[in-house]
Amino acid sequence: MAATVRDVAKLANVSLGTVSRYLNGYQLREDNRLKVEQAIQASGFKENMLAQAVRRNRSMMIGVIIPQYRAVFFMAITTILEQIFEQKNYSLLLCNYENDRHRLQQKLRFAKERLVDGLIVFPSYADAGSLPILEEFAAEDIPVVFIDQLLPGFETDSVIVDNAHASFRAVEQLIFNKHTRIAIVNGSPDVYVYRERLRGYYDAMRTYNLPVESGWVKEGSFIEPGEYVMIESLFDLPQPPTAIYATNYFATIGTVLALHELRLNIPHDVSVIGFDRFDPIDVIEPPLTLVEQPLERMAQTAADLLLQRMRGDHKDFPQVVTLNTKMVMRESVRAL
Amino acid sequence: MAATVRDVAKLANVSLGTVSRYLNGYQLREDNRLKVEQAIQASGFKENMLAQAVRRNRSMMIGVIIPQYRAVFFMAITTILEQIFEQKNYSLLLCNYENDRHRLQQKLRFAKERLVDGLIVFPSYADAGSLPILEEFAAEDIPVVFIDQLLPGFETDSVIVDNAHASFRAVEQLIFNKHTRIAIVNGSPDVYVYRERLRGYYDAMRTYNLPVESGWVKEGSFIEPGEYVMIESLFDLPQPPTAIYATNYFATIGTVLALHELRLNIPHDVSVIGFDRFDPIDVIEPPLTLVEQPLERMAQTAADLLLQRMRGDHKDFPQVVTLNTKMVMRESVRAL
DNA sequence: TTGTAAGCGTTATCAT
DNA sequence: ATGATAACGCTTACAA
């Protein structure tokens, strides 16, 4: 049905080797080049990437393993990854492991069976112990890059963000504005990044000799009904906070909704610093002061690292690149 | 390096044909089966899916073409698609076309070059005229299924939702509760589904002989700063609405935020019906009455249809399956 | 520069 | 049921 190099060769009256060489960018004699080009046109020849893959032993696929498609942070980075890799003619084999260690192992195996040339993993909730498959990638020299988090127990190139420092600076910013009673609305402590963000909060408070009252640390998913009652309860305390640092997108939205509910004005009554800038965060009034992650650079760095390893360049392996977040001052913090 | 059927055959002292047959589930003589199994164990043989793909002329990849990874609706369906296809050993070639006709055509070509066995497309913003590549899929008998929207000009199996009817019922529900002044906060009229949702609104109002005041129809993305000022302006009208029907996730959030801003209580001051139930919608107080789309069934239907076509069963082609949304009554509608 | 032929790791068709 | 062998569509020595 579909034309093959053989058909093209026949049509052009050259050998199939010549056609193949043409396709791979080798120099041809002028008349032959013309004949081949015409034959390709005439036959509607399209190269078969699968056959190429077998022959070259490269699938031209990159596995991208994601905790949850619903979490826009991962997908925002994946959008950029796709653009980068598409330019190099790689396609993405996306896998969602639904935040489940067991499914993660499954998905890694799945990607390996598909013979991906490289792997980018967001290792949320994971531990190396439950992921023996990773050693197989290492053994077969299939490069793996972690993004967003490390995975203790398996050392490989990683691109992360300094979460503790991000928190430190956010809290510090509040302190600079004379806030002393600062609460944190944090993601689940099961996730490494949230433990880090919490650590940065404590660090900042300690550094500036501020006490952390019991009840100022709230942790949750903030996607379940009524979960922001937890946030509201901050204001039942004898010493309610004057500022709230919310450490992710859902916590930020939840905080805003809770303050609305309590008829507390941002920033007049309570100052707020949020985390991550995803739709529809920008719609919120007043514009929120936010910690923003360098999504582009994370993606670009991870991609570059992976491509470098795939080229066989193992310089400085394993490299851990730590990027900094950016605090963007808007209007949700008031100086006391 | 990696063991092949040949290696296994040698190790087991059988022909490679026997090994291949074993792998493909044919009956073997007991002793041979044992030998082959042992050889597979011993050699750590893993089948090479790429070689299989070439030989069988089936890539075992399904292209899934998505307007935007950031839009959780698409990703929610994709999550389900992935589960369904994984069970059949298909992998997903996900492509994001960033809501751009031109990039959509590119991505379709990309998927075709990768020899996907089938295609699922969310054709937002698209028109068949700008997508000549679709005809190539048809010509080569690569099944294409549209989901969420049709694409006039290219007829193929499609799974959609009755958006107009969804709106009709939502508005009707408000009318049943004695509301007569009902506003709609709608997505961009550039998108077919929003034109449909608006049509349903008008239909319902007309059916019940209710006037639609000028200024009751708001359209926008509701992700840009200050866009909910549009919603707030509803209440500057001489005849402000007593109920708002928001036709997507962002419109719903925007509406809630705007009402908070205006210190209007839901449902006491204003009744609200929203659309789509994605995080963190459930966190909103009171629980919102929502139009919910049958994500599972959409995904399952599209997948079934595609698999059927890939099996060569072209019965009733092209099939357009229209599913119904579900109105879930919660607490954001008050009877007047 | 070109043609020939071997080979990638499979599946599938023959006889046997 | 099995072995031998061709074939899938391509790349890549090797010789010419």
Image (cartoon, coloured by chain):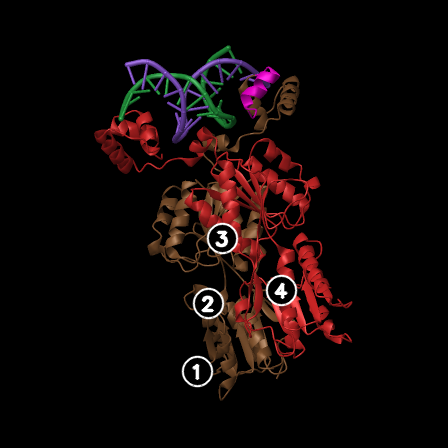
Chain colours: A brown, B red, C purple, D green
Q: Is residue A153 above or below residue B287?
A: above
Read off the residue under disc 3.
Answer: B79
3D distance between C-alphas at marks 3 and 2: 25 Å
Q: Amino acid at mark 3?
A: Thr
3D distance between C-alphas at marks 1 and 2: 18 Å
Residue at the image point whose x is 41% and y is 60% from the top: A125
Asked if the residue at tag 3 contacts the one at tag 1, i.e. Cβ–Cβ closer than 8 Å, the answer is no
- Marks 4 and 1: same chain? no
The image quarter in which residue A18 lies: top right
Read off the residue under disc 4.
Answer: B170
The subunit carrying tag 4 is B
Q: Which mark is residue A148?
A: none
The subunit carrying tag 3 is B
How many other residues sit within 10 Å of disc 3, few (<14), some (14-19) or many (≥20)?
Answer: many
- Marks 3 and 2: same chain? no
3D distance between C-alphas at marks 4 and 3: 27 Å
Read off the residue under disc 1.
Answer: A214
The image quarter in which residue D2 lies: top left
Q: State left or right for residue A37 relative to residue D4.
A: right
- Start and end of the magenta stretch? A1-14
Read off the residue under disc 2.
Answer: A194
3D distance between C-alphas at marks 4 and 2: 40 Å
User: Magenta stretch containing residue A266, yes or no?
Assistant: no
Task: Report the mark closest to the observer, 4 or 2.
Answer: 4
Residue at the image point whose x is 67% and y is 48% from the top: B100
